[in-house]
Image (spheres, helix red, strand yellow):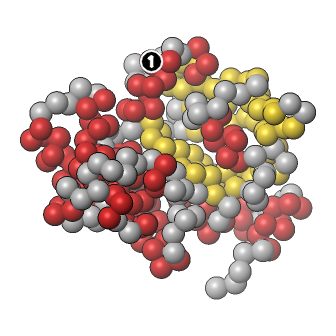
Amino acid sequence: MNAPLLSVRGLERRYGAFIGCTDIDFDVHPGEVLAIVGESGSGKTTLLNCISGRLPPTSGLVHYRMRDGRFAELGALSEAERRFLMRTDWGFVHQNPADGLRMRVSAGANVGERLMAIGERHYGALRGTAIDWLGRVEIAADRIDDQPVAFSGGMRQRLQIARNLVTRPRLIFMDEPTGGLDVSVQARVLDLLRGLVADLGLSVILVTHDLAVARLLSQRMIVMKSGRIVEAGLTDRVLDDPHHAYTQLLVASIPES
């Protein structure tokens, strides 16, 4: 297998005596989708925030392969380097789109801001790229000047996806990306995400409590309980033949279709 894009070793995050996550080790390779699953309070969101630079770990290392081939330790990067990475090579799709959008500026401006972070200044080019990406996420071009406050929840989530992908990042973090949507809207967003991930060859770290979402989007899975990884492996193997008792309970709780 090729070299990892992101490598996590010995990661721990404590809140005083409380353990958010501990003894975390895994790699993510280019083009791979890794799902982190578990019930509320399992530590999956804490882990996601640590590896995405949103929360400093108490101990452990997170290394990322930069575009120049350098394998950089995230804690050693300057604040400016981390900000640039988050605006360009990484994306973060929140469960609540309002957390990842500027709700009072236009849809086009939301997409264009990421391009401006990498130096694009030509208005025509910014607008043209924004229209292209709105089309990719199934938002009509005539909505480009509308603000996200006028959009439905599903449209806001699709706009947040466009905003994140416009700079062609290599790694996307997703925190329950369909968790706040109506069931009728979830399938559309999931199909869109699956197509874009495949077309762009993205690496994704996906946090979800929904095992059906994990099966649809991911190749590998980590199961967390009480801040620790209790099982890991290929997604189909973990879901079809779970070894750990906790994973077996999670799988058994999936409603039959």
Q: On the rendered structure, is 3 left or right of 163?
A: right
| Quarter-of-image position of residue 29 | top right
Secondary structure at badge 1 equals: helix
Front position in the image: 104 or 160: 104
Quarter occupied by the N terminus: top right
Q: Position of residue 231 (x, y in %)?
A: 79, 51
> What residue would you read off at disc 1?
80
Crowd rating for badge 1 (residues with CA inside 10 Å; few <14, some 14–19, many 20+): few
Residue 28, position as x, y percentages in the image: 58, 39
Residue 79 or residue 252, whichever sits in front: 79
* Towards the viewer: 176 or 256: 176
Question: Residue drawn at (81%, 44%), measured in percent from left and top?
Answer: 227
Residue 182 drawn at (x, y percent): 51, 75
Above or below 153: residue 117? above
Q: How many marks?
A: 1
Instruction: From the top left corner, tell me how far across and down residue 109 is, in percent.
Output: 25, 45
In which quadrant of the rendered image does the C terminus lie?
A: bottom right
- Which residue is drawn at the image coordinates 58% and 57% (left, top)? 176
**At label 1, which amino acid type do we have?**
Ala
Q: Is residue 215 visible?
A: no
**Residue 169 visible from this viewpoint:** yes
Q: Quadrant of residue 58?
A: top right
Q: Is residue 69 left or right of residue 72?
A: left
Instruction: Name the residue furthest left.
Output: 124
Question: In the image, is residue 61 above or below residue 153?
Answer: above
Residue depicted at x 70% and y 41%: 46
Residue at 63% across / 58% down in the picture?
208
Q: Residue furthest bottom?
A: 257
